[in-house]
């Protein structure tokens, strides 16, 4: 019996149990890092065993020595009779077990404490009863002949163990399903982006499993390019070359391609032996009949095709880029990673996007030592990306003579695109290296091509996906998107330099983006537009300083404010202010908007005093620029009124908020969102001043309209409800107040859990209310949730965080947790003194508790 080594400690336990059961065990306990280190003694021991016991750990599929041992068992199990492989699984799942056929047979789960070992010994004993002879008795141990020749082994095969066994599983499924009356040979189609390692994967599969193909390994190079007639001629020459290899040139009539194919078919039928027929780099664009003509000419030929085309019919295996761990392993074949800064290596691998060819050439370049990894990353982030072309000239040889030029590699696929495919790829190259939603792509096409744009976009996407230059992905909630590798974008930018074309595209892209995103002040839209936001951050980097860039910054700021990412909003506002100053001075519309947003951010952060310091001098400048009834001036006045209340200046805020409400109502009507927002602020001012009747009248009217138009789960409806609940509480109607608060909390948490500014406020409001009723236990839990959520939602110190922790401390004190409550209250007091003005109502509460 042979054990495929994976974990020495557990392997020793397994060996002990098997030997105690009277079984003869051959075990390899040495660390073997590659096939070259697998000794003749090891292979001889395996061939003298009756079964292979695979202790299938998490890393088993990627260890060459383990996989070599497993392969011997797989080959020996291809004939009739019981399997020569047994699996002992030390993990809970089964997805790591490859090939998949091993999951269909009995698998014994074991652990380091010995659970399952006795069952394993019994299973091995029972399996051996039905097996006579050893693995080495099989007739499959002669190495298969290769055409044109067996290539030298490639040592840098990493991260593809699972994909390799997928090929085997697919071929075996086809083989089992076939009969001699079948219309054609088994076929597996391995597709993927150029340079992603398709040829290397298939070559490694053939190398490992060549014993399973006693009829030979035939490698047909289809060259990946050319018109249909040229491709057909290349096929006829390739089949003729195989025929000459098998029969000699005197016995082959190259002028009769049909006769040559028939000659090959009769040969393989007469031999009756399985062979592996590999068609490498088959070009896209062939019809079904032409594609089928490239496959093995006999049912005894198992065909594997590598191609960038995703539409050819067969058992499809889509090969993506390498994982970060596998990328690091491949780069480590060139560089001593332990001597390099880990963050720098991570940045390099991220820039290369897991693309194996790019990692190979970049690693070879960096290994020369004339360019540091950090400089290499900087050059990769540069606009032209030419560094990889330089690196390619310095890289060593690649499998199957693959081109070392990234540009040449991708241009072969790009050449197959029509006009629409090129348009989509061009669009993707100037957007962020992130999924592009279908609606954004369609919107961009519509900007340039009118009503037909979305239909033409669909055609372009189909072309790019069809040659693996884009991947179709599900983004969530029924929204589809497309992923284009950053290196493909670099190649497009390198190969296309038409004056003015980039600027023209970017102009249409930002207009399409703003139309798709729409109003982001409603947090319910954030989940719908999250996939468009990376492109906004990219556009503000590549679009020159302009009103277009400023508009995107404004949307990003409001998006961040609504999400509670106030530091990000402030950053965008400051850049907006600077760019406005650059374009036209302090009174340029962008500069004024930047100041406005900074004031909003300070107010949202719980710094009403700082907000007033910006907004009070800003308001008259806006009114002078646009007029007192302009949207911008009224918005600033509305926020300024709210900030004034936060500073204890409700009497000053009331006339300002009245004016805003009346002017919004006059211009926009009762039901406009801006009017309703102004009504909420006005009602809050009445509440603050103790005029509860007017407060409920204004707030209740606004809420009724909001519920009718926007629904109960509208965030501003919840804000209205919280204010109404406070009015009812002050009026003594605690039962209705409690009902309103619990309803508001339920709505606030329903969509995003606790992680929204609105949920923080609803949790805090109900906690404060329950403390007044003596419900300290529940209040402590609610306030604690609010405090934790506030730390996650808000950037830095925030009024809502201070208030949540204040009521948490009060609840703890009332529950007798005096020491912890005192420590928390002191921290609250220090934070409040730093952030809030002395006149703020919360300050008085904190001082009274302290």
Image: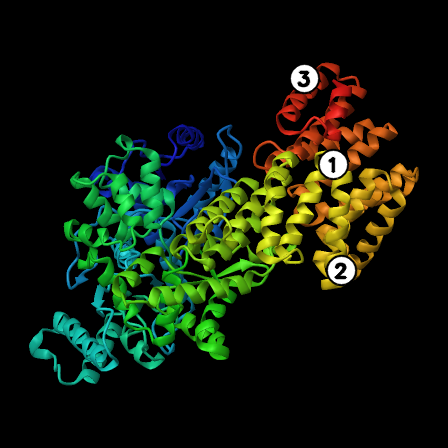
Q: Which element type, helix, strand or loop, lies under badge 1? A: loop
Disc sitting over residue 649 in the figure: 1
Where does the image place residue 226, in percent across and percent down from the top left?
23, 75
Where does the image place residue 37, in percent across and percent down from the top left?
22, 38
Where does the image place residue 619, in percent across and percent down from the top left?
62, 48
Disc sitting over residue 270 in the figure: none
Q: Give the mark nearest the N terminus, 1 or 2.
A: 1
Q: Count residues near mark 3 (Cα–Cα under 10 Å), then give few for <14, some for 14-19, many for 20+.
A: few
In the displayed structure, 730 sits above or below 627; it is above
Q: CA distance from mark 1 to mark 2?
A: 24 Å
Disc sitting over residue 665 in the figure: 2
Q: Residue 138: in sight, yes or no? A: yes
- Residue 709 is left or right of residue 629, and the answer is right
Where does the image place residue 264, in percent across and percent down from the top left?
21, 76
In the displayed structure, 585 sits above or below 670; it is above
- For the C terminus, the quadrant is top right
Q: Residue at the right extreme?
A: 732
Q: Count residues near mark 1 (Cα–Cα under 10 Å), then give few for <14, some for 14-19, many for 20+.
A: some
- Residue 247 is left or right of residue 549, and the answer is left
In the displayed structure, 201 sits above or below 598; it is below
Q: Which element type, helix, strand or loop, lies under badge 3? A: helix
At x 78%, y 46%, the residue is 744
Task: Find out whether the residues at labels 3 and 2 contact each other: C-beta distance under 8 Å.
Answer: no
- For label 3, the residue is 823
Q: Give the mark nearest the N terminus, 3 or 2.
A: 2
Q: Count residues near mark 2 (Cα–Cα under 10 Å), then give few for <14, some for 14-19, many for 20+.
A: some
At x 9%, y 73%, the residue is 248
- Circle 1 or circle 3, nearest the eye: 1
Depth check: 757 or 147 in front? 757
């Amino acid at each position: 019996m042979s054990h495929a080594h994976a974990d020495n400690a557990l392997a020793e336990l397994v060996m002990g149990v098997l030997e105690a059961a009277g079984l003869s065990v051959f075990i390899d306990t040495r660390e073997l890092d590659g096939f070259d280190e697998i000794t003749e003694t090891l292979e001889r021991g395996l061939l003298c065993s009756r079964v292979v016991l695979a202790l299938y750990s998490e890393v088993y599929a990627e260890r060459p020595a383990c996989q070599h041992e497993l392969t011997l068992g797989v080959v020996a199990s291809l004939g009739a009779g019981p399997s020569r492989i047994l699996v002992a699984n030390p993990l809970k799942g089964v997805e790591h077990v490859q090939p998949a056929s091993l999951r269909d047979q009995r698998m014994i789960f074991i652990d380091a404490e010995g659970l399952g070992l006795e069952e394993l010994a019994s299973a091995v004993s029972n399996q051996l009863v039905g097996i006579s002879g050893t693995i080495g008795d099989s007739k499959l141990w002669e190495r298969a002949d290769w055409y044109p020749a067996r290539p030298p082994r490639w040592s840098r095969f990493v991260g593809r163990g699972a994909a390799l066994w997928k090929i085997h599983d697919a071929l075996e499924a086809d083989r089992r399903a076939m009969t001699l009356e079948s219309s054609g040979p088994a076929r597996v189609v391995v597709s993927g982006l150029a340079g992603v390692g398709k040829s290397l994967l298939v070559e490694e599969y053939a190398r490992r499993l060549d014993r399973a193909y006693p009829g030979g390994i035939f490698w047909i190079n289809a060259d990946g390019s050319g018109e249909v007639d040229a491709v057909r001629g290349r096929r006829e020459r390739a089949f003729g070359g195989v025929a000459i290899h098998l029969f000699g040139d005197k016995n082959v009539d190259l002028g009769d391609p049909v006769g040559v194919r028939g000659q090959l078919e009769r040969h393989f039928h007469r031999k009756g032996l399985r062979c592996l027929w590999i068609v490498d780099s088959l070009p896209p664009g062939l019809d079904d009949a032409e594609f089928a003509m490239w496959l093995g000419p006999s049912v005894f030929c198992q065909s594997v095709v590598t191609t960038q085309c995703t539409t050819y019919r067969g058992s499809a295996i889509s090969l993506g880029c390498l994982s970060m761990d596998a990328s690091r392993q491949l780069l480590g074949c060139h560089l001593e990673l332990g001597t390099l800064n880990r963050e720098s290596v991570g940045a390099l691998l991220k820039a290369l996007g897991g693309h194996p060819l790019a990692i190979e050439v970049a690693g070879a370049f960096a290994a020369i030592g004339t360019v540091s990894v950090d400089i290499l990353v900087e050059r990769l982030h540069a606009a032209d990306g030419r560094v990889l072309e330089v690196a390619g000239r310095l890289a060593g040889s690649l499998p199957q003579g693959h081109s070392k030029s990234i540009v040449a590699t991708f241009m072969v696929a790009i050449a197959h695109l029509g006009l629409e495919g090129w348009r989509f790829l061009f669009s993707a190259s100037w957007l962020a290296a992130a999924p592009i939603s279908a609606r954004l792509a369609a919107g961009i096409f519509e900007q340039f091509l009118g009503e037909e744009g979305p239909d033409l976009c669909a055609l372009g996407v189909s072309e790019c996906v069809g040659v693996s230059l884009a991947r179709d992905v599900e983004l969530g909630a029924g929204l589809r998107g497309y992923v284009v590798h950053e290196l493909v974008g670099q190649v497009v930018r390198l190969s296309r330099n038409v004056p003015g074309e980039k600027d023209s595209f970017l102009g249409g892209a930002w207009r399409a983006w703003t139309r798709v995103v729409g109003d982001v002040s409603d947090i319910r839209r954030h989940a719908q537009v999250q996939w468009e936001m990376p492109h906004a951050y990219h556009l503000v980097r590549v679009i020159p300083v302009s009103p277009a860039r400023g508009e995107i910054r404004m949307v990003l700021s409001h998006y961040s404010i609504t999400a509670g990412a106030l530091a990000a909003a402030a950053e965008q506002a400051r850049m907006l202010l600077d760019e406005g100053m650059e374009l036209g001075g302090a009174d340029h519309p962008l500069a004024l908007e930047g100041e406005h947003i900074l004031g909003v951010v300070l107010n949202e952060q719980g710094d009403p005093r700082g907000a007033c310091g910006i907004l009070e001098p800003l308001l008259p400048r806006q009114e002078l620029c646009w007029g007192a009834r302009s949207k911008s001036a009224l918005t600033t006045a509305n926020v300024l009124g709210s900030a004034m209340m936060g500073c204890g200046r409700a009497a000053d805020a009331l006339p300002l908020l009245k004016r805003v409400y009346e002017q919004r109502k006059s211009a926009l009507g009762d039901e406009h969102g801006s009017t309703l927002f102004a009504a909420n602020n006005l009602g809050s001012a009445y509440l603050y001043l103790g005029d509860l009747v007017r407060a409920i009248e204004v707030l209740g009217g606004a809420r009724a309209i909001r519920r009718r138009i926007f629904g109960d789960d509208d965030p501003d409806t919840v804000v209205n409800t919280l204010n109404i609940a406070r009015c009812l509480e002050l009026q003594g109607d605690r039962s209705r107040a409690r009902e309103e608060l619990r309803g508001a909390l339920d709505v606030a948490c329903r969509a995003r859990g606790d992680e929204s500014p609105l949920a923080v406020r609803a949790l805090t409001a109900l906690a404060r209310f329950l403390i007044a009723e003596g419900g300290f236990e529940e209040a402590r839990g609610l306030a604690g949730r609010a405090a934790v959520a506030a730390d996650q939602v808000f950037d830095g110190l925030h009024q809502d965080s201070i208030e949540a922790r204040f009521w948490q401390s009060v609840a703890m004190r009332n529950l007798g947790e005096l020491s912890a409550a005192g420590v928390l209250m002191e921290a609250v007091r220090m934070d409040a003194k730093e952030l809030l003005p002395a006149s703020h109502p919360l300050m008085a509460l904190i001082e009274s508790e302290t």
